[in-house]
Amino acid sequence: MNFKFVVIINLFLLISLTFSAHAKNIPPKLKPDKFIDSSAHSSKPSKFLDNLTKNKKKEQTILKPKNEVVVEEEKNPKKEEIKKEVSEVKENKTTEKKQEVIKTKETKEVKKKDVEKTEGPKEIIPKIKPHDFKSFTPEHKGPLETKTLGEKDFEITKVVFDYVDKKQWRFALSDAQKIQDKTIYTLVNWMYLIEPQSGASFNEYQTFIKNHKDWPRINRIKYLAEHKINFDNNTPSSIIEYFSTNPPLSGFGRLRLAEAFLENNQTEKAKNLVKDGFKDAELSKQDLKYFSKIFKKFLTHQDYVLRADYFAYEAKYKDLRDTIEYLNPDYQKLYNARAALFTKKSADSLIAQIPQNLKEDPGLIYDRIKWRRKKSRFAEALTLMNQSASDSLMRNQYLAKERLSVARDKISDKEYKMAYDILKDHRLNEGADYAEIEWHLGWIALSFTNQTEIALNHFLKMNAAVSYPISKARAAYWIGRTYKKLGQTSQANTWFKTGSQYGTTFYGQLSHKELDEKRFSINNNFKFNEEKYEEFKKNNPQAKSVIILKELNRSRYTKDILRHLGDAEQNRTSEEISMAGMLAQEIERLDFAIQIAKNASYKNLNFLEISYPKIEVPKQVKGQKILDSSVILALIRQESEFDLSANSKVGAKGLMQIMPATARLLSKVTNIDFSREKLTRDKDYNLALGSYYISDLDDLFGSHYLAFAAYNAGPHRVEKWIKAYGDPRRKQIDAIDFIELIPFQETRNYVQRVSENINVYEYLNDPNNATNKIEKILYR
């Protein structure tokens, strides 16, 4: 690789930082400050990168942005669901945004001789449900046919869903009532009620909640119902009665119930609800004025301070601005400064105006720490952090995240003792942040400061705080590794055995590798009976709705229904979860099937047949030998969950989430005509470019996991990390420590998830004779 190439590609990558999803949060030392000769570490020359220098016209390379991935942390499903309802009700959209399609000139099809297909699997697992991948999403227009409805009902249903697409709900509901099969009316009514701007009344919500408790996202419907309560059409007693069986899910709901109690002369009950609900109720300016007036005798200035404090910590600018008007002048100055700290470049002048007695406000200190951390001013953030007192008013879970960010910076600087000291005062005793910090404390002590006994204590604390398989496997592996370093082999193997039970996870697979067991197996909860499945589709109204939506070419509307049918949190049986996943596959939504399986995996239930689909992938593209199918499939599963139409928020497209600018450059190198539209419509085209790129990166780095990191964060960053932390290929640093040193949580998670996926796909190729390939992935 010559110097001219290195200069050009680094120029491309420097420009791309403007668009990269990571760029804003990169500490200065991790941003490219000089050109790096990739050949110093390369195993083989990069055909793609080398060929870029042959292009006379310089083009801008935009790195693939961050994807939304499953973060390795504990989640509270109920809390997450309520948070989802809160965010969705604020969307305030009247029509569904259409996917942007850029018209391009018709391009030539990729010739079959350019992309040689594998002789491997030509159908998804299980074999009882073969698929033709060309019919995958996005949905293609064509004649609509039904085997579920009568001819007349189907014709009306087509009209109904034309109205649904346009969100013309009254027309849709009116026509749906004409259909003999009442499944359609229930389905349309449900879709109408989960749309926040549909115009549905409280009474319509109340009726549905009473009659259809088993329908998906019932908590969302209840949440929206609370926001539609109207005292003009409902008596206080009827509202109290409604809430007696449907407790409030929001601050707004608690205030409405308090209002009903007040109207019913139940003052004490009203007072308690007001104090509880007012603090976090998301209110319009008009509603805030209204509730402030009717609850005037209950609300004190301190209640408004608590409300302002809540929204300042949550960085919800609008709610904070509206609340500031009700504060006294001193507190207005405090919260104007806090608002500026998360909305403006500088807040110095506003901070200077804060009265002396409020300048040590814990929330203000937190916002100043956060502001400095975002500006990569870590030393200043640390100074403020050290000055902050241990105060019950300080929301320690918020500060803990800042501690972790600053500590990670110190780890990157190899200031391990300082990183440990920053984290040890975390002031938490439970939750995801507690577990993550305890793991980091153990990791620092074990891997960098040689405090093995101390490390063990931290890892044990982490293990006690987590329950999800990814986290349990992680804790067990590191406890085992610590005992191994202490020379306590028996204890180490006990923990490795515990970790190995989670065979679909990265650290579970590493634990198994430590046990000297030749056979590798993964527990599988998939249970399927064809006869019961056909009965399920015929008799379950929601399953029937899914089939009808597919017949209408509207499978995009099935996600919530399918996930509900297979929701492990609803205590579904293994057979029910399996059938829901198979139904998702039958309607050609492998992504929804994977989501069902992932949700079940949080309860340590594996449904391999629906969680790890197989499709044909190329063996060779334009002379470039493509990586094994298990690698390509593993990457696709993490990138798009096999959704051909996938579009990330910043533009990555298709199965392998390729940025259009990167695709254009890859097209030049491979001599495959570029088409932006085909990235999300032609699976062979997307696969050809994406598999070429990841295979080329693998050649460049001579390592699967380094190639994955480069695919996610950019090759220039991987070069930076190798220079900063040492080259794991040359045994300068352990591969696992190198992965954990990656400064982006998303990329750390990405590398681990893709690596573990490979092992599962390898297992599925031959379950009876499978061996654990994780060591090969990391140390080949």
Image: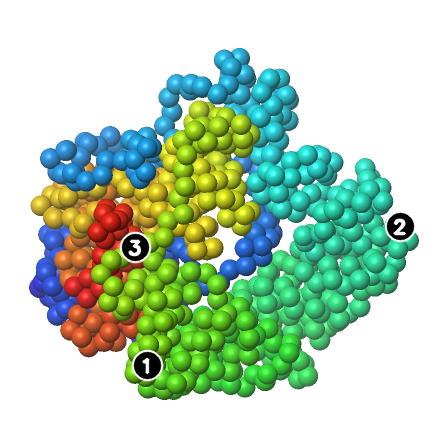
**Disc number placed over residue 521 in the picture, else none:** 3
Answer whether labels 3 and 2 touch (C-beta < 8 Å): no
Identify residue for label 1: 488
Q: Which residue of the protein is positioned furthest toward the right in this rendering?
A: 265
Compared with 664, 200 (above or below) is: above
Foreground residue among 283 and 762 = 762
Location of residue 123 in the rendering, given as x and y in whole percent from the top left corner? 27, 35
Location of residue 330 in the rendering, given as x and y in whole percent from the top left corner? 71, 75
Answer whether labels 1 and 3 touch (C-beta < 8 Å): no
Tell me which label, 2 or 1, sits earlier in the chain. 2
Estimate the spatial distance between the alpha carbons at disc 2 and disc 1, rounded to whole Å.
68 Å
Few, some or many residues within 10 Å of mark 1 (<14, 14–19, 20+): few
Seen at 77% across and 69% down, the residue is 301
Amino acid at circle 1: Gln
Image quarter of residue 416: bottom left
Residue 171 visible somewhere in the drawing: no
Q: Which residue of the protein is positioned furthest toward the front in this rendering?
A: 490
Location of residue 172 in the rendering, given as x and y in whole percent from the top left corner? 59, 25
Amino acid at circle 3: Ser
Tell me which label, 1 or 3, sits earlier in the chain. 1
Estimate the spatial distance between the alpha carbons at disc 1 and disc 3, rounded to whole Å.
26 Å
Seen at 74% across and 62% down, the residue is 276
In the image, taking residue 359 as reference, residue 472 lies left or right, namely left
Identify residue for label 2: 264
Foreground residue among 305 and 469 = 469
For the residues carrying marks 3 and 2, which lies nearer the camera in this image? 3
